[in-house]
Image (cartoon, helix red, strand yellow):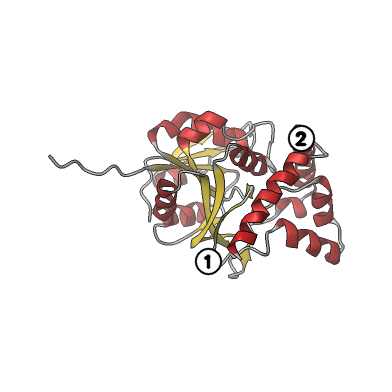
Amino acid sequence: IETASYMSVFGVGLVAYKMKKSDIKALSVSLSYTNPVYKVVVDNSPNSESKEAFENLGWTYLHNPKNPGFGFSHNMIFNSYSKLADYHLIVNPDVTFTGNVVSELVHFLDQNEQAGCVMPKVYFPNGKIQRSAKLLPGPLDLIGRRLPLSILKNKVNRRLELQQANYETGIFKAPFLSGCFLLFRSRLIDDIGFFDSRFFMYMEDIDLSRRLWKNSTYPFFYSNISVIHREEKGSGQNIKLLMIHIASALLYFRKWGWVDKERRKINKECLEQFVKMS
């Protein structure tokens, strides 16, 4: 008797805040190339005027005007829906792509048990690559990237952004992946926990990536497919968002330590793979 081979399935979680209808449509069109078993949005906007636009495009719409934050809202989706899928995709509102990008990421996780999550290559709309796989930052790194000193900023970025890595054709692990487009193993997240909801916004993706690395279920960068991410860098332009970013950074370093030997060890492990590749 022949039995059908098992096909891994995935679901999608989105957290929105005053999302433009044009962006709702653009992201929904991108996801139409895929076949998620659920597609859920938590809308943290003050009103639910986007409800019809989302539901007309096949989303399960949840409204939470109290706006408990990015991580808390993603946890709401994961806790309620992830049992339906092997993998859980989080995607930012300003991401678009063509083709069945997610299927290739699903295949990668199917074939690589040591990978806890995976992200594709990410481009800015102008075609420039976003260096979305990084080392774990220290306090001075975050300060250095904010100072208006291009020599210092470039030096910090060269190290943190793994500029020795092959972003064009490489596949490698990194202890910090940007949370704009990530596919996770659902049952693994059941074990180690999803986002730390104490982070309202910012730093929660560093915290989760780090916990995955410590668990030896590594975050992987996979360059064979790509998405486009607008990345508005809100905390660089908005004082309120900057204050939120600073508060999250303080929380992160209180959690993991200001003098962080483990961070150095993890970053060293990450860099060693590039020596072996060369």
SS category of the residue bearing label 1: loop
The residue that mark 2 highlights is 251
Residue 116 sits above or below residue 238 on the image: above
What residue sits 55% from the left and 37% below the top?
74
The residue that mark 1 highlights is 169
Q: CA distance from mark 2 to mark 1?
A: 35 Å
Crowdedness near tag 2: few (<14), some (14–19) or many (≥20) residues, C-alpha within 10 Å: some
Crowdedness near tag 1: few (<14), some (14–19) or many (≥20) residues, C-alpha within 10 Å: few
What residue sits 53% from the left and 52% below the top?
119
Which of the pair 183/12 is nearer the observer?
Answer: 183
Q: Horizontal and vertical percent for residue 225?
A: 47, 61
Q: Amino acid at mark 2?
A: Leu
What residue sits 54% from the left and 41% below the top?
217
Q: Horizontal and vertical percent for residue 102?
A: 43, 52
Q: Horizontal and vertical percent for residue 249?
A: 77, 41
Which of the pair 250/97 is nearer the observer?
Answer: 250
What residue sits 74% from the left and 37% below the top?
252
* Contact, mark 2 vs mark 1 (Cβ under 8 Å): no
Q: Amino acid at mark 1?
A: Thr
Figure quadrant of the N terminus: top left
